[in-house]
Amino acid sequence: MDNFTYCTPTRYDFGRGVELKAGERLAQLGLKHVLVCYGMGSVVRSGLLDRVLSTLTKASVAYTLLGGIEPNPTDPKVREGIALCRTEGIDGLLAVGGGSVIDTAKAIAAGVPYPGDFWDFWAGKATVKTALPVGVVLTIPAAGSEGSGNSVITLLDGLHKISLRTDSALRPRFALLNPELTFTLPPEQTAAGIADMMAHIFERYFSPTADVEITDRVSEGVLMAIIEEAPKVMRDPTDYQARANIMWSGTLAHNGICGTGRREDWVSHFMEHEISAVYGVTHGAGLAVILPAFMTFMAQHAPRKGAQFARRVFHISEPDDTRAALLGIDALKMFFTSLGLPVTFAQLGISDPDITLLVKKLHENKGQTIGGYYPLTATETTAIYKLAL
Ligand code: NZQ
Ligand code: ZN
C-alpha cells in the first residue's frame, strides 16, 4: 500500500427532505448572496428549484439564478457565471442538479477570484489556490462530483474536454442527497449513471499497486451492491431503498475512498471524454462502451485485476487469469445490456467513429503515454477504440 492523504471535507445530509436544508447550510457558511446554478429545466419542472429557493429566502440568503447549463458543459456558461458573480458581488454557489451543473458551479467558483482566464487551470497553466464555496443539491447519482474535487469542462474552441483535479479546493462544502429527487430520472440517465459510478471504481481498481486488500475489498463491495440494486431501480424507479443505495454508491465510488493507498488508472475516462466531446453522447453511456473494450485489452496484456474482479464480483471460478477476465467482461456486458446500455459504438449511435481523430485528441490532451495500470501509447489506444466497434 502506498502512503496517502485522504481529506473529504464535504458535509453530507442524506435522506428524504434534506434539500430543505439548503438555506440553513449556506447561512452556516456565512454566505450572503449565492449564484444558484441549474440545468435545462428538470429542476424547474419538478418544483425542486422553487422548494430550494424558498429555503434560501427563509435563511436570508439572497440569490441570482444561472440556468440553462447543458450536459457536457462548456466554457461560455462558465464565463457568463464568472461575470455575473463579479457584477453581483456573489460570495458562494449552490448547484442544483447533476455533474454538469456541479462542474460548472465549481469552475465559476475557481474563476471568480482568479485574475486570469479560468481555463488556465484546465490547461495546466495555473493551480487553484482559492475558490468560492460550493454547495450541492444532487439530482442524479452518476458523476460523483458532489464528493469529488474535480470539474470537467469542454473548451468549445477545439472541443477540449478536460477534467481538472484538485485535492480539496473544489470539493463541495456540503451536499444534500435525497434519493426521492432521482425518481424522475429517465431510465437511460439512471443506467448511464450506474455505468459511470462503476467506472469510477474501475479506474482505481485497475492499479499496479500491490497489497491494497482493504481498498480492493471496499471497491468490490460497492460494485457488488450496485450490481444488486441496479435492476431494482430500473424495474421500479420509485423504489426508495434501491434509489438510496445507488445514490450513496455514486458518492462512495468517486469521493476518493476507493483509491486510497494506490496509483489510479483513468484511461477509460480519458478515452470516453474524447467521445462525449466530439459526439455529444452521455458520459456514462460512452463509458459502458469503452470499459469492456479497455478490459478486453487488459485481459490480453495484464489480466491480473480483471481476473480478480471476475472471481470476486461475478464469482467466476476459472483458474486461468486471461480466461477468467474475459468471462468477467462477458458478465459485465450482459449486466450493462440488461440495463439498456450500449456496449458498442454502433449501439451508442456512432456507426463510423473517427478513431484517428479521437486518438489524436486523446494524446494531445493527455500526453503521449497514458494509464496508471498499463502504459498505453497511440498504438494501444487505437486498438482499444477498435475493440469497441
Ligand atoms: O439539464 P436537466 O434538465 O436538469 O436534465 C438533466 C440532464 O439532461 C437530467 N437530470 C438530472 N437530474 C434529473 C434529470 N432529469 C430528471 N430528473 C432528475 N432528477 O439528466 C441529464 C444529465 O445530467 P448531467 O448533469 O449531465 O449528468 P451527470 O451527473 O452524469 O454529469 C455528467 C457530466 O459530469 C462529468 C461528465 O464528463 C459530464 O460532463 N463528470 C464529472 C466528474 C467530476 N466532476 O468528478 C467525474 C465524472 O467522471 C464525469 O466525467
Ligand atoms: Zn465518470
Image (cartoon, rainbow, N blue to C red):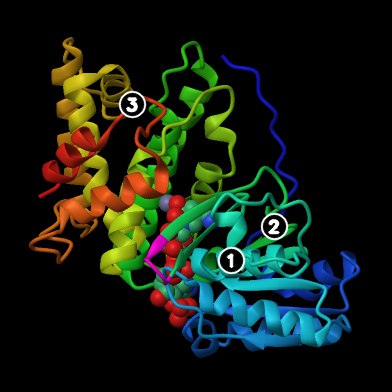
Task: Specify whether tag 1 is near ligand 1 (CB below 8 Å).
Answer: yes
Ligand 1, image quadrant it occupies: bottom left
Residue at 32%, 29% (x, y): give it. Answer: 313
Task: Tell me the quarter of the image containing the N terminus.
Answer: top right
Above or below — where is 146 with respect to 4?
below
On whether residue 106 falls in the magenta region, the answer is no
Mark 3 vs mark 1, CA separation in Å: 31 Å
- One can see residue 143 in this view: no
Contact? badges 1 and 2 (CB < 8 Å): yes
**Amino acid type at image mark 1:** Ile
Residue under label 2, please give it: 172
Near-viewer residue (185 or 369)? 369
Residue at numbered disc 1: 102
Disc 3: CA contacts within 10 A as few (<14), some (14-19) or many (>=20): few
Magenta segment = 156-160
Q: Earlier in the sequence, mark 3 or mark 1?
A: 1
Depth check, mark 3 against mark 1: the one in front is 3
Which residue type does callout 3 highlight? Pro
Check disc 1 and report its element: helix, strand or loop.
helix
